[in-house]
Amino acid sequence: MRALILGALVAASTWLVLRSLRPASGKTGQGAGKDGPGAKVPLVQDPVCHTYIPKDTAVVLRHGGTEHYFCSDRCAEAFRDSG
Ligand SMILES: [Zn+2]
């Protein structure tokens, strides 16, 4: 009697295992692309070293009514000294 019950349990558990092994659906988990932080900040070019820097972190120098953007104070000073 016990052997029959055990047999039934084994058969049931085997059936459950086989059932769970089947692929449920064709889902593919692909992560969505992330935008980097500050991706929308416009880039400005340093006229001295020609590096592109984000406008919000650039050093601004007003010269003759025009704003010039630099990567550092050093480049701003070099631009001012040159003319
Ligand atoms: Zn520079």
Image: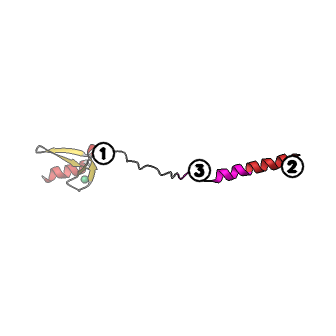
Outermost residue, left side: 64
Looking at the image, which residue is at 60% across and 53% down? 23
Between marks 3 and 1 in the image, the one whose residue lies nearer the viewer:
3
Q: Secondary structure at mark 2?
A: helix
- Principal secondary structure, stretch drawn in magenta: helix
Q: Is residue 57 left or right of residue 63?
A: right
**Residue for badge 1:** 40
Kindly indicate whether the residue at mark 2 contacts the one at mark 1 (C-beta within 8 angstroms): no
**Residue for badge 3:** 24
* Colouring used for the render: secondary structure
Q: Position of residue 60 (x, y in %)?
A: 21, 44
Q: Amino acid at mark 1?
A: Lys
Instruction: Give 42 or 31, whichever is nearer the viewer.
Output: 31
Kindly indicate whether the residue at mark 1 contacts the one at mark 3 (C-beta within 8 angstroms): no
**Residue for badge 2:** 3
Q: Position of residue 51 (x, y in %)?
A: 26, 55
Q: Amino acid at mark 3?
A: Ala
Outermost residue, right side: 1
Gap in angstroms between the C-alphas marked 3 and 1: 41 Å
Q: Which residues are magenta?
A: 14-26
